[in-house]
Amino acid sequence: MAGSTEAETPPSAQLSSVSQSVVNLVKNIVGAGILSLPSGVAAFSGSPEALTPAFILVLAFGLVSAYGFVLVGDACSWTKASTYQDAWARTVSPSSKWMPSLACLANAAIGCICYSMILGDCLSLILQPLGLPSILASRSSSLLLLTAGVLLPLCSMKSLAPLAKFAALGVLSNVYICLFVVLRFFDGSYRIGGTFWSAAPLAPKFVRLSGSAWSAALTPSVTILLSLLGTAFLAHYNAALFYDQLAPAPGGDKAGRFQRVAFLGFAASGLILSVVMIGGFLTFGASSSGLILNNYASTDPLAASARAAIGLSIVTAYPIVFLSIREQFVEFLGKRGAALQNNRPNVVTVGLLGSVTALALSLNDLGKVAGFAGAVFGIFLIYIAPPLMALRARQRGIGSHAKGARGMASIIAQTLLIPLGSALALMGVVQTLG
């Protein structure tokens, strides 16, 4: 691998405020994955009582994921690094720098490929009923038109700050999905005799618990929900980018502002995930499918809008994830990459976006690959690499660390994250390949 250079934020790149960073972070975290959580609950119970342990698990995973995100920012602050790889190299070891590099690139690349595949399918389904020539309404043409007309301009932006207004649209689309899911539960449209009950692909199904909700949550089937939650809050491949492009406080401090971004971003994301999980499960129970919107009737006009909303959500999340691909590519090429990015940025963007789109057009099912990458690389970036960087930095005297009881609590928490991450990775691999 070519030697890397410290990728300073270009002077032309606009730094992000706390509010802009929070919006971008929520959009980075919340994608189509929110629609699978009701099925995670249904995997171990068909009773509404199961939502209590499920909700607590969402809070726990959100808290731990936020902590890992903050630890990456701390490592960047201590070492003056602007990328995940450099923070790892300066705290853990330069020789193993390829590990976070591969993990960041794999998660971002597979994320964008999956997004492209979903968008191509969704847009073609929207265009086909309009009577357009088949060549224009096909999956390939739809994706190419969307990529050239929408994704390319968004992905050509130099920093996160200008993407915030587009990310805000994506967050609003997620809010609409939350409101739709909650409304359809309260209005009873899918209950027996409801407006859409007979038109739903699967009838709602609820099962009474034979024991407590917590005993149900201790069955092996809960591993499906755990695997989903393990990477539900994944945005850590962009943590260094968020830190690097965050505007400092008037006194020059970034760490406090970054912690605020992490707290607000992960809290808002956790709320969105919880609402969709609870509302979807309370409506369909054990019948909740892996993509909860598939449970709603095709004749439900609000469901059609929700499907369009998830498309908008993906479109606005795409450039935030793509920024990570571009960062990893430039980092990999070292000085040549930095020069190419500075002198011919459009060549880099078009080349990478074209490659992602070509792969999306040639693939039909990326499920197992994406699941495996999330279980291995995503878990590494969330639960394993951040505490390793923090522990090694403390050991090597890099940065300032809490002392006394608070410092000991930090060491214990960071040490426990590593076996937790290893267990989640193993669980995810088994679920993906099983």
Image (tube, helix red, strand yellow):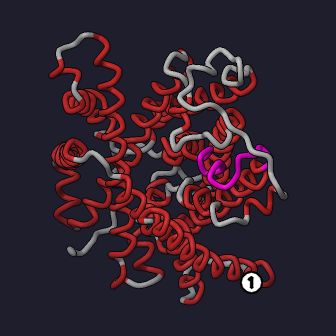
Can you give x and y, in whole percent of width and height, for residue 213 in the image? 80, 56
Quadrant of the rendering where the N terminus is positioned: bottom left
**Which element carries disc 1, helix, strand or loop?**
helix
Crowding at mark 1 (Cα within 10 Å: few <14, some 14-19, many 20+): few
Q: Which residues are magenta?
A: 37-49
Q: Residue at x 54, y 22 (%)?
A: 297
Q: Main secondary structure of the magenta part?
A: helix
Residue extending furthest toward the bottom: 395
Quick check: is 354 in the magenta stretch? no
Q: Residue at x 68, y 59 (%)?
A: 63
Can you give x and y, in whole percent of width and height, for residue 155 in the image? 31, 40
Q: Residue at x 61, y 18 (%)?
A: 196
Q: Quadrant of residue 199?
A: top right
Tell me, yes or no, if residue 250 can be seen here.
no
Name the residue type under label 1: Met
Can you give x and y, in whole percent of width and height, for residue 175 in the image? 61, 30
Q: Residue at x 73, y 60 (%)?
A: 217
Image mark count: 1
Mark 1 — residue?
408
- On screen, residue 83 above or below 204: below
